[in-house]
Amino acid sequence: MKLNIAVLAGDGIGPEVTQQAIKALNAVAIEFNHKFYFKTADVGAVAIDNTGNPLPDSTLDLCKNTDAILFGSIGHPKYDNDPKAKVRPEQGLLALRKSLGLYANIRPVKAYETLLEQSPLKKDIISGTDILMFRELTGGIYFGKKELSQDGNTASDLCVYHKKEIERITHLAFKAAMNRRKKVTLVDKANVLESSRLWRRVVQEIAPQYPEVIFEVLFVDNAAMQLILNPSGFDVLLTENMFGDILSDEASVIGGSIGLLASASVGEQFALFEPIHGSYPQATGKGIANPIASILSAAMLLSHFDLHKEAQLIEEAVEKALELDVVTPDLNPNNTQVTTNVVGDFIHDYILHPEDRHRNHSNSYLGQSTII
Ligand code: IPM
Ligand code: MG
């Protein structure tokens, strides 16, 4: 298969981790005889520095003319600490999501067996967790009218949803559930918010079209608690934009590191793949950023094009890295020598050398022989 991929590495650790995802994709291309062409473009703080716009037209044009987008991360402290900043890097990502109609953000959350001890949560609680979050991505409070009064003392952000916006992501969530454990949990705040009551009504109307799927509802405050108390009780979690943003960061604790969580943002025409973590400015250039979320986002990209074997091989390589402790210091603080690049190289080599796959890889990342 031939794929044109736009690479928007963005800010902070974005370029370092995205580089590892590209490495994994290049290895897959060689191993399976595909052709992946990468073109880079600026987004976020780096784009503001270069053009004054966090999403330059040239970047948007490139995205509209490619098969998929590989995204890094966005954000810079100089804007975070300036509440008066007129332009913010995050606006680039939001504009991109909106302009490309990427309405469904899909975030898998898994407790890897080999990492059960890494999570601050008890092993017994997280064991077996396998959640697929469907976060609505182009509506709600993120995109509603924003107002600040003349005197600067009153502000509001409107949360608006239209039935159609709820319907399309609901169908995606139920279809995904059909291929999984057949359960959908809608998370809302229908006891307080009108927009949540609309969500509940619309989803309840659609649920009977999927009679095999168990459908349940949870208020978001309770869902936040259940994610910690009983995460393995969730299968597909469906929710609106803001709740999904918050709950997916919370859920990342289950796996032991936010550096493991990948995501796909899809719409009718376009698809973007990105780690859920931010730009982690303190780590920039230090080689300590975990590239796995970005690498797993590349695997989601492959699955999106039905390259399932290829995606599985990346996942297998990631699991091997976790198993053999080829992980960055967020997962093992003793691994000061295991840099972002080392993890990326290990995964690249694992994909590329099928003959070594079942051999002992434990020393390979230190440059020693892979042959026992
Ligand atoms: C995410 C991020 C973004 C969001 C930011 C960077 C705008 O937190 O993808 O979860 O809030 O959606
Ligand atoms: Mg977020």
Image (tube, helix red, strand yellow):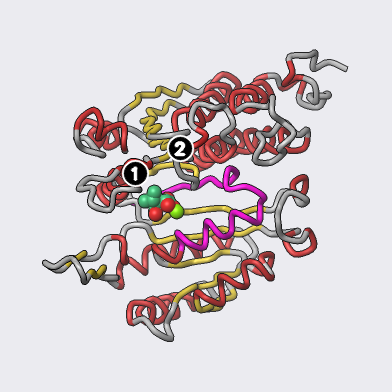
Is residue 73 part of the magenta span, yes or no?
no
Residue 233, quarter of the rendered image: bottom right
- Residue toward you, 185 or 281: 281
Is residue 302 rendered to the left or right of residue 230? left
Quadrant in which the C terminus is drawn: top right
Q: Residue furthest right?
A: 372
Please state which amino acid type lies under the numbered disc 2: Pro
The percent position of residue 3, horizontal first and vertical second, equals 41, 28
What residue sits 66% from the left and 51% below the top? Answer: 255
> Residue 270, labelled with which disc?
1
Residue 291 seen: no
What residue sits 69% from the left and 59% below the top? Answer: 129
The residue at label 1 has a CB less than 8 Å from ligand 1: no
The percent position of residue 95, horizontal first and vertical second, equals 26, 48
In the image, which residues are magenta? 244-267
Residue 45, quarter of the rendered image: top left
Q: Is residue 281 above or below residue 145?
A: above
Per the image, label 1 sits on a secondary structure element best described as: loop
Q: Which residue, given by chain and number where applicable, does mark 2 sit on?
A: 281
- Residue toward you, 340 or 202: 340
Per the image, label 2 sits on a secondary structure element best described as: helix
Is residue 45 rendered to the left or right of residue 341? left
Mark 1 is surrounded, within 10 Å at the Cα level, by few (under 14), some (14 to 19) or many (20 or more) other residues, namely: many
Please state which amino acid type lies under the numbered disc 1: Phe
What residue sits 37% from the left and 40% below the top? Answer: 76
Q: Magenta-highlighted stretch: main secondary structure?
A: helix
What residue sits 27% from the left and 45% below the top? Answer: 88
Mark 2 is surrounded, within 10 Å at the Cα level, by few (under 14), some (14 to 19) or many (20 or more) other residues, namely: some
Is residue 333 rendered to the left or right of residue 170? right
